[in-house]
Image (tube, rainbow, N blue to C red):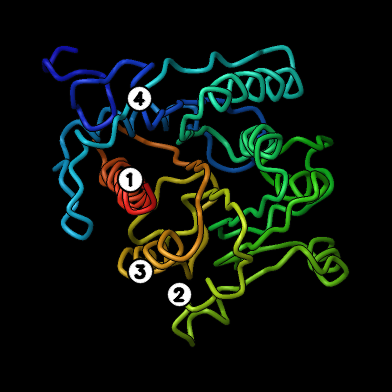
């Protein structure tokens, strides 16, 4: 790179794939975004911004260089169809899970979570999905497609995964009716969470392998304006990190994705927040994994 920093998450010297413990997987897929485009530029912007952040986490005492981070090449977008792209993502992730790697995928739009979760479920059959998101994403179809950013969690439920959507504050009548009927699709609405110490909802999440998907519109537009579909009334950094700390401490997280960051420029505040969030997640994973070994 022109600034002399390695193109690896955190700007640290990359470890070899063989020795890597954490893989950062960029997936710049964007075909079904319905409001603000640009999520395909999210992964690159997060990695670029991450090279300028402090790489020591004060809460866990973890330094990024001890996490074993290896940044993979981007998964090339398949132009033929959304379905073709889903297959490419699933096949790629399966190859890494076979080698027992912990995967942190960067989107791209939220539809990429379906093949990521599908691949993880083959290795963790008893899988629960925790979704931090402003939207339910439980439509059956959107824009004529079953594989959309607005249908992704419906497809996940069809895999047989219990789901916990947290921070939801926008959904359709169809989704509301579906959620009332499906006892394994849990929706923790933002309007309810505001009035309570909402990190306690970790206790409602089953103690089984957890896949964590974070749509960046979970955050309030005041601190995260650059998302595909921003929604007012979102959450802020302190309470979010408090919840994540509790989730990683009390449950086993086996995979992560972050999606729907749509940058308007390089090195924006939103890109730095996204980078810091991913490092926080990696530090929490490393800290609790070390405790169990």
Residue at position x 52%, y 42% in the image: 255
Circle number at residue 20:
4
Query: For mark 1, what is the residue?
Result: 286
User: In this rendering, which labeled residue sits more in front, label 2 or label 4?
Assistant: 4
Nearest the camera: 116 or 286?
Answer: 286
Tell me which label, 1 or 2, sits earlier in the chain.
2
Task: Judge whether residue 143 can be spotted in this image.
Answer: yes
Circle number at residue 154:
none
Tell me which label, 4 or 3, sits earlier in the chain.
4
- Look at the numbered discs 3 and 2 and tell me whether their residues touch, using CB distance below 8 Å: yes
| Image coords of residue 291 (percent x, y) | 33, 54
Establish if 276 lies above or below 204: above
Tell me which label, 1 or 3, sits earlier in the chain.
3
Query: For mark 2, what is the residue?
Result: 199
Report the Cα–Cα distance between label 4 and label 3.
28 Å
Q: Secondary structure at mark 4?
A: loop
- Look at the numbered discs 2 and 4 and tell me whether their residues touch, using CB distance below 8 Å: no
Tell me which label, 3 or 2, sits earlier in the chain.
2
Query: For mark 3, what is the residue?
Result: 242
- Look at the numbered discs 4 and 3 and tell me whether their residues touch, using CB distance below 8 Å: no
């Amino acid at each position: 790179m022109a600034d002399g920093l390695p193109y690896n998450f955190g700007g640290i010297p990359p470890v070899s794939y063989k020795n890597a413990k954490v893989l950062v997987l960029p997936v710049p897929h964007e075909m079904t975004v319905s409001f603000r485009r640009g999520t395909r530029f999210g992964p690159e912007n997060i990695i670029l911004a991450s090279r300028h952040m402090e790489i020591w986490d004060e809460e866990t005492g973890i330094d990024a260089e001890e996490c074993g981070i290896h940044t993979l090449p981007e998964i090339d977008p398949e132009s033929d169809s959304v379905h073709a792209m889903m297959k490419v993502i699933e096949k790629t992730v399966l190859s890494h899970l076979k080698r027992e790697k912990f995967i942190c995928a960067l989107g791209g739009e939220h539809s990429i979570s379906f093949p990521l979760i599908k691949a993880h479920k083959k290795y963790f059959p008893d899988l629960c999905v925790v979704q931090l998101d402003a939207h339910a994403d439980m439509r059956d179809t959107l824009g004529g497609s079953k594989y959309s950013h607005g249908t992704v969690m419906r497809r996940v439920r069809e895999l047989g995964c219990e789901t916990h959507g947290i921070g939801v504050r926008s959904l359709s009548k169809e989704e509301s009716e579906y959620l009332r009927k499906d006892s394994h699709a849990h929706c923790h609405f933002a309007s309810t969470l505001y009035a309570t110490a909402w990190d306690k909802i970790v206790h409602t999440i089953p103690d089984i392998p957890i896949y964590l998907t974070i749509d960046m519109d979970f955050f309030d537009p005041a601190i995260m304006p650059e998302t595909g579909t921003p929604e007012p009334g979102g959450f802020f950094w302190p309470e979010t990190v408090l919840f994540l700390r509790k989730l990683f401490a009390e449950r086993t997280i086996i995979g992560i994705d972050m999606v729907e960051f749509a940058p308007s420029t390089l090195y924006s505040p939103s890109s730095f927040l996204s980078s810091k969030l991913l490092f926080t997640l990696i530090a929490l994973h490393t800290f609790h994994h070390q405790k169990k070994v």
